[in-house]
Amino acid sequence: MKHTKIKDLLSSSKTAQEVNAKGWVRTFRNNQFIALNDGSTINNIQCVVDFENTSEETLKRITTGAAISVTGELVESKGAGQKYEIQVTKLEILGDSDAEKFPMQPKKHSLEFLRENAHLRVRTNAFGAIMRVRSVLSFAVHNYFQQKGFVYVNTPIITGSDAEGAGEMFKVTSLPFDNPPRNEDGKIDYKKDFFGKETNLTVSGQLEGETFAMALGQIYTFGPTFRAENSNTSRHLAEFWMIEPEVAFNDLNDNMDLAEDFIQYVIKYTLDKCPDDLKFLDSRLTEEEKSKPQTERSEMSLLERLNFVLSTNFKRVSYTEAIDILRDCTPNKKKKFNYIINEWGADLQSEHERYLVEKHFKCPVILFDYPANIKAFYMRLNEDGKTVRAMDILFPGIGEIVGGSQREERYDVLVEKMKALGIAEEELWWYLDTRRFGSAVHSGFGLGFERLVLFVTGMSNIRDVIPFPRTPMNAEF
């Protein structure tokens, strides 16, 4: 008999039918009641074993983590909290699990312990829910852009360019580490490397994406990106997924409209598709908040926060206005910030971003028109000569979730900006070609997918929303 997913069994309208279910044992009580889960839903199905007619040897093998197959009649449950159960007539152990050694016992585990067992943590309720939500969010991303006629572009993972200009890149080489070929001046001779030049793992697909937007009109990328930034925080990963749309003929206002509409769409889609998982994560966060001091607790539950983002227009504020607010705020005056805001031109830190969102405006905020000297070379210079058409979207609990800009479409201005930063024209000759041949106003943004998953699931550490986190000193699994 073909097995049926537990999600489908629990939503069935037909009882008194013989069914087969396969999954992993969560708990086994009184030699009679199995809580079985197959990953299709956060909810288990109860399987009632006729222990008097089941061998002692088989009963001993029904342990937490064991994979089993049960066949029996789907009936209305007599117990509270579940609609249906399976009265088991046939039970087969597919894979044993040593109860004493299996790490995922049915009890509360610390998140740190679960990260050390990332290959098994997805068998817990929390991580099963997080990964299903991640999957649905991922589909919603594609759904949104495909419905709007965007072209999905796969930009290179190995690249010779540094889109961010930060230099925090992982090098890609086939040269021997112990004795690489060298030039006359003693430097490594990359002409003898696999690609004949220095290459690295991409930090962004934006520059390549722009070239496609200038032919196809509107494109998006959604793929892995890498940062060799030695940052051990709850918001940074060395390997993460990035969503990057680029749109020809869009100015900064169009860009802000697109980003806001996109975020609200994917959140609503996930709320509609993952009610059980989000309800569980909402309860989990509420319990977690109880252990915090009253002043640190969120004013809204997870579901309230998600619905609030859907029903609220994002507040649009210039960088200059934000600096004035921060300079005059109580935490700054009392020196409670780690980074005190004294003057215009300061690079905003997470603590400043979160103050604006969580304390001052109490809603998502879009900051725009940043100082040119703290932003990337490709952002369009404003008429004042000191700010650029950049925008960041700030979210509660996260800080920056989106960074974007209107791109500098003027060839002469772009070349001057590159010269000022020491970026060689010959390195990005192909990028400059888009400004030589049919240049036009265009804009785009980047959204770190894991930060979006972080917000939607209510988790507090980015390591807990990606299957196998890559962070400094950690490349396990």
Image (cartoon, helix red, strand yellow):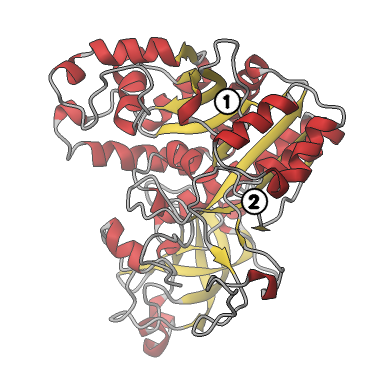
Q: Is residue 381 visible?
A: yes
User: Could you tell me the amino acid type at mark 1?
Assistant: Gln
| Residue, disc 2 | 161
SS state under label 1 = helix
Up/down of 335 relative to 277, above or below: above
- Residue 258's image quarter? top right
Q: Residue at x 55, y 10 (%)?
A: 384
Where is residue 198 drawn, in percent x and y? 63, 63
Can you name the residue that lies furthest to the front here? 184
Distance of mark 1 from mark 2, alpha carbons?
32 Å
Where is residue 295 drawn, in percent x and y? 17, 26
Q: Residue at x 71, y 55 (%)?
A: 156
Neighbourhood count class around disc 2 (C-alpha, 10 Å): few under 14, some 14–19, many 20 upward: many
Relative horizontal placement of residue 412, taking residue 163 as reference (left or right): right
Q: Nearer the viewer, residue 276 or 286?
A: 286
- Residue 193's image quarter? bottom right
| Residue, disc 1 | 264
User: Could you tell me the amino acid type at mark 2?
Assistant: Ser
Dot in front, 1 or 2: 2
Where is residue 164 drawn, in percent x and y? 55, 42
Where is residue 130 drawn, in percent x and y? 46, 49
Relative horizontal placement of residue 155, taking residue 348 as reference (left or right): right
Relative horizontal placement of residue 360, taking residue 465 as reference (left or right): left
Return the disc, 1 or 2, that comes first in the chain's sequence. 2
Q: Nearer the viewer, residue 462 or 421?
A: 421
Q: Nearer the viewer, residue 329 or 67?
A: 329
Which quadrant of the rendered structure holds the N terminus?
A: bottom right
Neighbourhood count class around disc 1 (C-alpha, 10 Å): few under 14, some 14–19, many 20 upward: some
